[in-house]
Amino acid sequence: MTLTLTINGTSRTITCEPHESLRTVLRRAGCYSVRYGSDTGETGAAAVLVDGRLVSADVMLAVQAEGHRIETIEGLSVPGTLHPIQQAFIDTGAIQSGYSTPAMVLAAKALLDRNPNPTEAEVRDALSGVLDRETGYLRPVHAVLRAAAILRGEEPASVDVVHLDRLEGSGTAHHDRDGLAPLAPRVVPNSDVPATRVVGHAETKTDAVKLAKGNPAFTDDRDLSGTLIAKVLHSPHAHARIVSIDDSAARALPGVHAVIHHGNVPRVRYASGGQSYPNPLPHDQVSFDDKVRFVGDRVAAVAADTEETAQAALDLIRVTYEPLPAVFDENEAIRDGAPVIHDEPDMEGAHDAAHNIVHHIEARTADVERGFAIADRVIERTYRVHQVQQTPLEPHIAIARWDSDERLEITSSTQVPFHVRRMLAPLLGLPVKRIRIIKPRIGGGFGAKQEMLIEDIVGHLTMATGRPVRLELTREEEFVSSRSRHPQTVTFKTGVDANGKLTAQEMRVVANTGAYGTHGLTVQMVTGMRGLSSYNCPAKHFECDVAYTNIPVPGAFRGYGAPQALFVLEAHMDDVAAEIGMDPIEFRRLNWTGVGDPLDIAPQLGEGDPEAGGMPIIASSGLEEAVLQGERSIRWDRRADPGWRQPANRPHIRRGLGFAMAMHGTAIPGLDMGGASLKINDDGSFNLLVGATDLGTGSDTVLAQIAAEVVGVGVHDILVYSSDTDLTPFDTGAYASSTTYISGTAVKRAAEQVRAQIVDRAALLLGVPAESIDLHDRAAWGPDGRCVTLAEIALSTLHRQDQHQIMGTASHVSPESPPPYGAQFAEVEVDVETGQVTVTRLVMAVDCGVPINPVTASGQVEGGMTQALGYAHCEEMVYDETGRMVNPAFGPYKIYRADEMPELEAILVQTMEDSGPFGAKAIAEIPMDGVAPAVRNAIADATGVRINRIPLTPERVWRALQVP
Amino acid sequence: MSDVITGYYRPLTLDEALELAARADAVVLGGGTVVNAHPGRPRVVAVDLQALDLDGIAAEAGRLRLGATTRLQDVADSGLVPDVLRELARAEAPNTIRNAATVGGTIGAADPGSPLLTGLLACAATVAVARAGARAEHPLEAILDDRRLLDGSIITAVTVPVGGRAVAQGTARTPADSPIVMAVACRDADGAVRVAVSGVASRPVLVDPQRLAELDPPADFRGSASYRSHLAGVLVARALAGVGGSERA
């Protein structure tokens, strides 16, 4: 049918099908800011204005919008300008990946057009239809309030960094917390940290403008003519053999160009986790197998002219299955007689496949039995942590094509482009040099994209058809066929002496890696590492079985085994403190690690080699200060106030406060590697090429700040390009909290090479000794106050005299993994008649060394706490008895939205970590670690009930309250 | 997006709409947010009511009239609508959906956990329905009991008596989550009290507060049958206390 749509003031004649959504049609019309998040309308990435109202273009037919005024962000500003709302989003740090930013800006515009002076609650309501997995909503909400103030002609609230007084050793607190602007990054400075010009400042993101404007920047914004659409046929059975596949009817369907399955794709073993060479065992996957191991497993894929044809082709593939018994629980899976999930003869590297035990991991520092024997008290509890999904708002998407050199070029939303290239080559039978992976902007990843998940499918299909092929997972596929967090059953046993000192710690884990082993070893090693590193204890023992089951596959998820470990550890430490009658923080303080303490379990779990470099020793910790700051912010003393704990006018409500300590790592020592190159341009700007993959965290900006600091320019004089296997140096990718620390050091070294070359030329031009020259304000300054600009130096070196390209290339691997520390606090209200828990405030004070950018660092903490709150409180992947996920959609799978958030506060406690660039440690993952135990401990404080499972949903809490 | 809508009509008159709605393959679009989100039905033609002038909120003859194509956002924003119904319209969905979804569509879709339906049920809403050559008004509970009352028909309006006072109480995983169980009590201008509960049956139901033990709720992962029964007791008592009494329905 033919429609006339009015898009951004222009009348357009459009041909479409009656069923096509407004989103589909707007994208086809070039409005790339209208983005896919789901088919059911609740993600809001496709929100547009229709007659000035914000609506989801996912669930509006294009034809419904005929005769109405449609606005997208493309109509909001012309090239080179920004709308004040867009500017406010940039200035407040409200943009992380930017995938849903256009929708949020339009939501703000719709609100402010009818209400120029909204309350915070009205702003939150206006943003309630745009889900965000990244920011925790704090910055977007205040961006809208800031834009409103500016549009009213008022002075907006400050977004400058606020320096809080250090509390440790001060006896009393000096600073007044009242009147702190909600958005101003809070930094507790450290006198050991040298002054810097760009590093440590709240610079705006280097990629913010294009994201604020919704410019084409993501994988799906790549528009190649003749692209075929791929669709995957998924298993309806949790465990079955494929007896036969008849694809003849599918192949005969007009518009179908390829059908691939185990019958026509070579059987090459691999492990899909995006990890360094050689990929850890087991190698238990092939592109298409003759067996399926979970509901949602791959059976076949098709490439067709349209999505409808591809879907129709899937329906025509006749698959005969022989269903097999299935097992879903990790404890049942490793019992004798359980169905054997990997019985194929060619699988490599499982510990005991006949018992579904992929790995058995043991680590010990000393004899724990002796430690338990000398203990005054021995306390043992069993905990269960569950399966949740990363849910990046942009699902997995990849587009493959043959380039003009007949090399396979794949544009993919991946965290690990270099690993994908290397891992893909044998599956496709191509040499690495014939594959190019391009990572454009990514709409969030959180570990789900640390995986070679779909690139082999588009690769096979392009090779089969010669045509470009695009595959984007639907939201349901993203839940079921992507990756998730490992569930675990954990028994923790602690020995403690009469003074409250630990004598022994034992952690026994049965972990569930689902149908495939990807990341199954390393996630569980991190569980052991994190569960047994926070506290000093003379004897520690970790034992873990990793089990195959028939649930969809867990993998990497922000925190990588640490959130599981720290829920258990910090719940357990709270339980032990209660049993021995000690204050929960005092008990931890008596035992927690600090500067000079060894990370004694680390060498047993693959981190640090005592033979080579000795035991890793903690070199920096701001934990004590973080705890004091957090106690002050949450008003920890209210635990002793009966009037607060039990409000008189709400008899069924109990209030409580909870604490958890968090400790994480910074990169994988001796393994994670980053490369960078930096070169000068004619005007004194620089190109920074990095293999590091910014998922929206702001790592490009942080790396630009590091380079800018060294060469004496502003952050926006550094043009960052990341990442492309043809153009940028190698980087292991965005995972393991490594980018700032590892890639940042590589950038710093490359920039130091460039600095030396600049200084040499400046010395020549100024006629002064090189060692007397300082670089700042885009110029090289001699001791006499004369200067030569970097543009002049560039022109001199590129065009005039002794010509050469000023550039530097460097890489970095660290033998260390310095721990960031955090103090997590939660305030809750529990309805003791219904079990409903309302989390009213979350505070996290974090020692991340020196935050290179306090705004992006605060955003990591706010967004991480919000994602962690979902883990604690409401998110869960739920299955029926056949193994089919019953809630693969937002809503039933509940993530927090803007209008129901607790108050959030992030406090950055500076320490100087000498092994990191400008003193930095990691920040990205530690905010995932403490929320679940802090909320659980707060419920215990409020009600006395200690719950050993998450999520803390109403019925679970109510049932716990019924136990006398 | 659904791939089963094979035709689209935007009738300009109610009679034209009724003629289309009488087709066996017709599906009526309010805002379309439910129909378009749930593919997999038989092939259908969409009959979009947006041009029929069925929207608008008015107080008339002791009743509040919500036109069928009134958007939920307009219900939430209207000063004419009682506070509890405004709150429940807001609780129905986030703003991106409220700006498209309609009152009539909410009744047509009959989501079992719908807060607004629960509220309308407690507030003794009636539903005006047109079919070829006939107009009828049905109590909302009759329509929820017998969906065939809507076959070949178009909902034109919902009306609610004014002067009542209602209180809603729900339990959910998070503050804006769809409630596991919600109870709404409404005391009308004459002092009679009606109580409706969601999450205890396949649709929101009117209950007798004295006979809650007879409920047989369906279970799902958010709440077992026994928990839902427990919640119904707690929440009905709280809602009744909120309207000042425990008169029977």
Image (tube, rainbow, N blue to C red):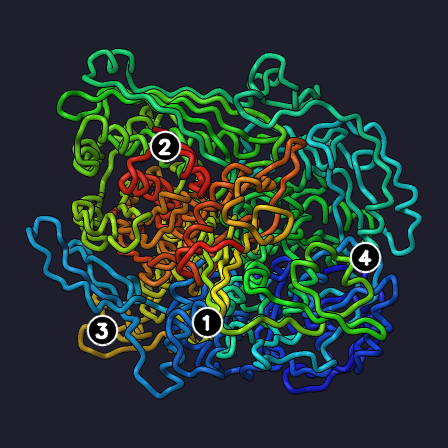
Residue A279 in view: yes
In the picture of the structure, the residue carrying the numbered disc 3 is A782
Q: Report, in whole angstroms, how far the alpha carbon at label 3 lies from the one at label 1.
A: 22 Å
Distance CA(mark 1)–CA(mark 2): 53 Å
Residue A693 visible, this orientation = no
- Nearest to N terminus: mark 3 or mark 4: 4
Q: CA distance from mark 3 to mark 2?
A: 58 Å
Q: Quadrant of the N terminus of chain A?
A: bottom right
Please give the residue where the numbered disc 1 appears in the rendered image.
A681
**Lower sequence index among marks 3 and 1:** 1
User: Identity of the amino acid at label 1?
Assistant: Asn
What is the crowding at mark 3: few (fewer than 14 residues within 10 Å), some, or many (at least 20)? many
Classify 10 Å Cα crowding around label 2: few (below 14), some (14-19), many (20 and above). Answer: many
Quadrant where the C terminus of chain A lies? top left
Q: Nearer the viewer, mark 1 or mark 4?
A: 4
Rate crowding at label 4 as few (under 14), some (14 to 19) or many (20 or more) other CA atoms within 10 Å. Answer: some
Residue A658 sits above or below residue A226 on the image: above
